[in-house]
Structure formats: structure tokens, C-alpha cells
Amino acid sequence: MIVTRLVPLAATLTALLLALVAAGCGDEKSETSSAPPVTNIAMTPELTAAVDDYREYVADQADDLVQRTTEFAEAVKNDDIDEAKRLFAYARAPFETIEPVAGSFGDLDPRIDSRENDAVEEQDWTGFHRIEKALWVDGSTDGMDEVADTLVDDVKELQTQAKTVELTPVDMAAGATDLLGEVSKGKITGEEDRYSHTDLYDFQANVDGSKQVFVLLKPILEQNNPQLADEISQEFDDVYAALGDYKRGDGYVSYTELTDADTKKLSQSIDALAEPLSQLAANLQS
Amino acid sequence: MSITRKRFLVGAGLVGGGIAVGGVRGLLAADEAGADDGTGHIAFHGTHQAGILTPQQDRLHFAAFDLTTSNVKEVRDLMRAWTEAAAAMTAGALVGSDTWQPTAPPDDTGEALGLLPNRLTITFGFGPSLFRADGEDRFGLARRMPPALKPLPDLPGDEIDRAISHGDLCVQACSDDPQAAFHAVRNLARIARGVAVLRWSQLGFGRTSSTSQNQQTPRNLMGFKDGTNNITAEESDAVHRKHVWADSGDGADWMHDGSYMVTRRIRMLIEVWDRASLADQEQTIGRLKASGAPIGGSGEHDDPDFKAKDDKGMPLIPDAAHVRIASPDNNRGIRMLRRGYSFTDGFDDQLGQLDAGLFFIAYQRNPHKQFVPVQRRLGANDQLNEYIVHRSSGLFAVPPGIPDRPGRFIGDSLLN
Ligand code: HEM
């Protein structure tokens, strides 16, 4: 809970008066005193190091993605449906850990990750979910060789771009919250992997990616707002504990096994984490 | 003051100038804070929580929460934070800091910016499960559980869905502006994240009671005047103490000047009701549809005559009529303060019918001596049962109000 966020009412009045002064008092319409939105913060050696480490993480994930996607594509092209199904969630995971970064590379994200209804013409539909449908719905890899090759090309391009990506600490922190938004929007509803029902694998990958950002920025946060750092750590633990209930063997149960009560609990645990995490960016400077 | 001021200034400097908001709306609200005439602002602080005997507003957003923490200190912090936010919102101020920073989500979600509170009241309650759930004393509060908060028994005709019933905590937000009520629940839910989660919630779009003699009696979705014979603010303190306010002698000191809230989401079978003849409808309620007068009377506020017979010797107000069974005359003087709302949740896809009815809310000194015996008789005999189903049920202890003093928060008499 964000108790620390609340400022006593007196502060409201102070702020109000200052706002009026800034707005030129008499101006009835003006409700805000606008300052240019500043989303950059002054870099410190700690922040620079965190960004460098994160870029390395992104590059590593992209390398993994290429390697795993290549394995997956081989299975598809060998017509080995069982093996391809087995590799599907595994191959996607590194993509899901860095999705917000991948999303910044033009149309690479849609090429790799669109779902059937994501406004592409049927014949232009490529990527993981196109193959997912072939494997689970059609039970056939007919016509998938080319899609598999394109997918490998696309993740390789992502790998190249990942090596030169420009990032600020604020982008990093925002990405951590965005990853949880991905969970709330797609994974918790079963929309993402609607044929394979492997949504919980993606769920974990999104949370892992978010956690990585937090881990790298945590030492800085601990100096600026230790209470917030503790709270976020605790909430990450709670999310992993909630997710742990659905582990089976190396992986997770099918999304179809979740009851409404299960998804409600998972969804609310993500909200409980995302709320304090959304304060991370504003707490990176002392 | 100096600390908060410093925090503001430092906060502003930090990002090269945050955006200060508040402006016109905040000032208007502050001006109006002195007015207690119902034009916009109802005092949050007082002997009793607002939202009970204060004039009933047109809109409701009700929400029940479950605590996810097992630490009573966090419950205390939550009530403290909720109190602070509720005091701000009911006064038309923003939640939290007015300095919005580009890199963080604003403390207040913003949709009430520029709106008056429109008589917003925020009323908090504690469910039985806060004290004991599945036999477990979760927060060390079990011995302070009021006898009146014992869970409600199963009642005749109940078809209660647990998923939309009960809860550890509740928030009743009422306003004449639905957005002000929604804003309240949304921001309280946000503040609670990590400590409590929403369990269920209900919107109401029109009041089905009056709590003041200065208010017109509204109509419920059956088209009948509802709230005619309700407890009103103008009645004497003795009446309120007898029927509405809990007393320290009732078994829980900390509830003195509080009250107990019962909620029931009652689905109306609108389609069935609409095919009932006017005479059937009036005999079901025991009052006339157009005027609201009791059958046999002529004015809305005429006393019903339960002894009157028609020319065949049958009771004019039938034995199974709702008002006959519910009337204090036939319940050894039992009364309660009704404060319900009409609701619709749109369309019932399973049945292909409108999903609408009455979200019944009643405040009383002891539900086991007031709501329960009356509902037991209604559930068994009321003619209205052909047209309604009780689908959700809630019982909450609503602690007393608090003075506007630093350190005080709603529920402190229990949690401190
Ligand atoms: C959908 C359900 C219900 C409808 C449509 C309904 C409707 C009405 C109407 C039209 C009246 C007459 C006007 C008035 O005095 O307010 C009334 C009175 C009353 N109702 Fe209900 N009611 C409902 C449920 C309940 C429940 C669940 C209770 C409590 C257990 C209750 C208790 C009362 C009481 C105490 C009165 C006042 C009787 C008197 O003093 O004459 N009602 N109701």
C-alpha cells in the first residue's frame, strides 16, 4: 500500500496557492501551471551502470530468442508437431521478457507476435501465433516452412537492433510497469496464447523481465526510498508465490484449467505489484 | 506545515517543475466547505459517519474488499490512508499530492478534477470476517467482535451467491454525481493495493429511499414510491438512538455512535412484474401505485389501516402485502433506516432479460433484532417474493465518526 504517497491536506492548500500564483491568479480557466514535461533525469555513475547492465540483459535475451526460435523453426520444418508444440512457449519466453524494448523496433513486434485479429490480412499474418494456430488448431505444418523462416529472420533482426538500442533509466523503469500491463491485458485473460493455452509461461516471462529491471535499479531505489524498495520486493515475491501454485513439472498448467477465482487472484496480485512499481521512475533521483 | 511545504518544493525542483493542479475546483470546494445545506459538500467529520442519516444522494458506488495482509498494523495504516483520502475527496480536494510529476502516475486519478463533490459521502464498514474467518482470529480482534455483527443466518427464500457477498471491509460512496462516487471507490481501491483487493462492487443509479422529510419520495423500479415510511433525520435523537445508533452498552464499546449495515442485492423479475395487473401490483405492496397512499387511504403519508376490511370482510391491505408484513405495527415496533438504490447491471445473457432490481441497504442498531426478524417474515410470506430474488448479502459494522483532529481515523476505536 502506498501510504507514503499521501500528503496531508495542508499540502493541498499550499500546492493550490502556488498553482494559482503560477497560473496568474485571475485566470479562471487555467487548472494547471504547465512546466515542460521533463522525463530525463541527470545521469549518475550508478544509473549509467544500471542502464548498461540492462542493455546487456536485453542483448542476452535476444541471443536466446534467436537460438530457441531456430530450434522451434527446425521442428516445424521437420513436420515434428509434438516437438514444435513442446518448444513453442520455451522459444517465445525471451521475447516476452523484453517485449517493451522489442515493441520499439518499428513493425518487428507485429511481425513476430501478432494474434489473428491484430489487423493484418490473413495472408500477411506471420510470427509465433500463426504457427501456434497451425500446430494446435490445424494439426498440420502445411505452408509453415516459409513462416518459420521469416520468423527466424525477424528475430535475428531484433537481435541486431537490440545491440544498439538507446535507453534511459526512465524508459527502463517504464518498461518494467509495461510488462505487467502486458500480463493484465493479454496473459491473464488467456487472449495471448489462445490455441496453445500456454499463457502462464508468457506470464512468468513478463514478470521475469520486469523483475530484472527492478533488480538493476534496486540499489539506487534503496538509497532514495527504501520503503518503496521493500514493498516492491515483497510484491514480486507474492506474485511468484501466486504463480507457483500453477506449476506443473518444468512448466505450467494450461490456461483452461484456471477458474475465475484463480485468474482473479493472479490479476489482483499483479495490480498489487504494478501500483508501487509505477513509482519507480519518479524515485530514481535523490 | 513546514514539512509538507518543503516536500512540495523539493518535489517540484526534482524534476525541473512538476505540474501543480487543483486550481479553480479546489477553491470552489473550499469556499463551499462551510455550507452544510446540501448544495455540494457534506462534512466528513462528526459524531457519526456521513452517509447514514445525512440526506440520501442519487448515486451509489458500493464496494466490498478482502484483506490480503495478515498484519493488523497494515489494516490500521490502510484505514488511516483511507480516512485521509476520503476527507480530501468529500471536500473536493485531490487525493495525495497536487504536484504531478511527468515520470510517475499522478496520485489522484483525475476524473473528478473540475467536478464538485456533489454531496459525496464515503462511509466505511467492517465485515464479520475481519474478526473471525473460518474459525481463525486473523488479526487478534476476535474478542472485540460485536455480538450484533454475528453473521446473518440463512433466511427463507435466500439464493445468495457468495462471490458477490460479504467482505472484510466495505465502502459506500454516495454522491449526486456518479463520477464523483466512482472516483472515490477507484482511488480507495488503488490506495489499498497490496493490502486489500476488491471482492465485489455494486453501482446504484437512483435512490429508493428518503432520509429527510425535505426530500421527495423516489420511486423504485417497480414504479412504487419507496421510502415513505422511513426513519428520517428530522425525527428525534431518541428515535435515532433507539433504532439506528449502536450504544456502548450493546456489547462493543468501540461501536458507540456507529451503526450496522445490511446490504442485499435484490434482483427484480421485471418481465414478470410488468405482466401483473395494477390491482395485483397494489395488493402486493399494500399501497397505491400512483399516489403511494396505503390501500384505503388517500394521501401518501396517511397511516395504513391494517384492520380495515372490504365489503366481503377481507383485509383491505392483504395479509401477504409487503407493507403489512414489514410494518413496525406488526413487528413489535421494529424499524430500520433504509437507504437503498435501484440498480441495473444491463442484460442477463443467460435469461435474456433485464438484470435490474434494488440494492437494499439498511442501517440499524442490531441487525439480529431488526433486519433478521423482519426479513424472516418477509422471506416466508411476502407476496413480493413472486417478483424478487435476493442474490447478494452483506453485513458490516460501521464505526462511529471522528472529529477533525490529527491522528484520528475511521475505525481507530477498534484498531488503536
Ligand atoms: C426489491 C425488494 C423490495 C421492494 C421493491 C420494496 C418496496 C417497498 C415499498 C414500495 C414500500 C412502501 C413505501 C415505504 O414505506 O417505504 C416498502 C416499505 C418497507 N419495506 Fe420494502 N421493499 C423491498 C425489500 C425490503 C426488504 C428486504 C426489507 C427488510 C427486511 C424491507 C423493509 C421495508 C420496511 C420496514 C418498510 C416500511 C413499512 C412501514 O413502515 O410501513 N423491504 N418497501
Image: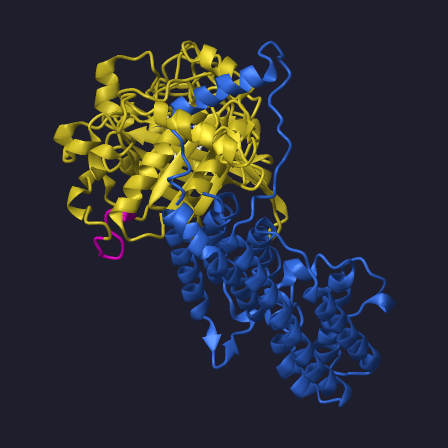
> How many numbered marks does the figure carry?
0
- Decide which of A188, A260 is in the foreground and name it: A188
Residue B327 on image: x %, y %? 33, 25
**Is residue B155 placed above or below A118 in the rendered structure?**
above
Main SS class of the magenta portion in the image? loop
Q: Position of residue B395 (x, y in %)?
A: 32, 40
User: Which percent across, then down, holds residue A12?
Assistant: 45, 23
Q: Is residue B165 visible in this depiction of the protein?
A: no
Instruction: Specify the quadrant of the image occupied by residue A176.
Output: bottom right
Q: Is residue A87 left or right of B269 when viewed as pictured?
A: right
Q: Is B216 situated above or below B380?
A: above
Quick check: B266 above or below A277?
above
Quarter of the rendered structure image containing ligand 1: top left
Colour in which chain B is drawn: yellow
Q: Colour of chain A?
A: blue
Whether residue A138 sits left or right of residue A207 in the image: it is right
Residue B343 visible in image: yes
| Residue situated in front as seen by the camera: A57 or B404 | A57
Q: Bounds of the magenta span?
A: B129-137
Residue drawn 52% across and 50% down? A44
Residue A278 magenta-drawn? no
- Quadrant of the image for the C terminus of chain B? top left
- Compared across the picture, whether A237 is left or right of A267 comes to left
Which residue does the image show at 56% across and 69% down from the upper left? A255
Of the 4 image quadrants, the one containing the N terminus of chain B is top left
Q: Give how far across and how far down residue B338 sits, in percent.
A: 37, 27
Please give left or right for residue B148 compared with residue B177 in the image: left
Q: What residue occupies the far front of the structure in this picture?
A: A45
